[in-house]
Image (cartoon, grey):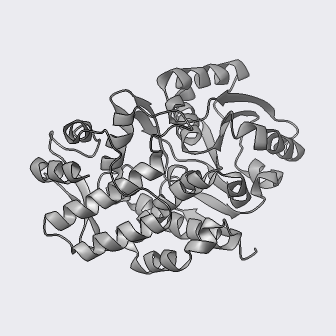
Amino acid sequence: MTASSRTVAVGGDHPYQIHIGPGLLAQGELLAQAIRGRHVLLVSDDTVAPLYLEGVRAALLAARPDLKTSQHIIPAGEASKTLDNFSATITALAALGATRDACVLALGGGVVGDLGGFAAACWMRGVDCVQLPTSLLAMVDSSVGGKTAVDIPQGKNLVGAFHPPRAVIADTAALRSLPVRELRAGLAEVIKYGAIRDPLFFQWLQAEREALLAADDTALAQAIARSCEHKAEIVERDPLEKGERALLNLGHTFGHAIETAQGYGAPGNDNLNHGEAVAVGMVLAARLSAALGMAEAADTDALRDLLAAYGLPVTIPAGLEAEALLAHMRLDKKNIAGRLRLVLWRGIGKAEVVPDVDEAAVLEVLRQG
């Protein structure tokens, strides 16, 4: 194993391994290890598929020439994570004749991983899924832990299922073709892990900014592995998000509200993508924590400065009304009995779930932008 390769084991009732390193999408034997049957549906989007799909298929068939494969391509972007595209993916599985031992290969970013994983969770009450994340955001967050879902107009990820993958294969070489905006968005989720539970990692991210933004394989593999180790430890203890796993959502309630208010816009527009919205959300959560007397304002400043240094937004986009954002936050899945339940912190590395948060305090933070 080279300095730019890592393996992270996820334990619990459904153990699997996360393989991290350059060139993994060309390793047919590695891809084939997780496939038990002979039906494989490759789900991807129209940005990623032209770059990698045929290479993955060729590598896989070289290792397993008996496989019967098909593909299902969706338009790129969050706007494609819909019930209609979920239905179309199910139809593709039916057309393939996929049996109970079939496998969905989700090749792409978080949208493809969520949609493909949800289809795998539902086809014949659950078939295998192997996550092949090609964005940093997916490598450190959505591909790990088994959360799958689609969006509806009322909110993000409100229709879905827990469905752990058979394996995650994260090819860091794919990040070289990633637009810089998407790389930065993924780094927001990496920074999140330092913010919620690892002050030393937070400091490392301060020191390694240039290497990470340059997509250095070794730096990226280390950042991805550390992020996945944190997520794996939490997911093992709380696979269905009954408690501790909610900590992984620092900034997400605010961020999802922003995304919902902006309508999950198409790629290339001015709307924030998921990582950018989470970056803003983390700053808002830190500001709220300070306003509630839980943390020092200096910690908020440190988080905001680090996110800004990575080129991420740290304020609410213009034109979004505080009251509308709060209304979207009320639909968050972490809420209990209609009361806001948010992930806040007591400083860098000390996140906690806070029930029954005062809506007036939230509204004031939202109004300040």
Q: Residue furthest front?
A: 318
- The N terminus lies in quadrant: bottom right
**Is residue 318 visible in this depiction of the protein?**
yes
Give above or below for 152 relative to 37.
Answer: above
**On the image, which quarter does residue 120 sit in?**
top right
Describe residue 324's horizontal placement relative to residue 105 as left or right. Answer: left
Describe residue 259's horizontal placement relative to residue 97 as left or right. Answer: left
**Residue 11 location, x and y as percent?**
51, 61
- Please name the residue shown 67% across and 54% down the image: 169
**On the image, which quarter does residue 236 sit in?**
bottom left
Give above or below for 77 relative to 365.
Answer: above
User: Number of numbered discs present?
Assistant: 0
**Residue 253 location, x and y as percent?**
31, 48
- Please name the residue shown 79% across and 44% down the image: 56
**Which is nearer the eye, 314 or 240?**
314
**Residue 313 location, x and y as percent?**
42, 56
**Is residue 244 visible in this depiction of the protein?**
no
**Which is nearer the eye, 50 or 222?**
50
- Please name the residue shown 68% across and 28% down the image: 72
Describe residue 154's horizontal placement relative to residue 41 as left or right. Answer: left
**Residue 180 location, x and y as percent?**
61, 55
Give above or below for 197 relative to 365.
Answer: below
- Please name the residue shown 17% across and 51% down the image: 362
Give above or below for 182 relative to 87.
Answer: below
**Which is nearer the eye, 113 or 253?**
253
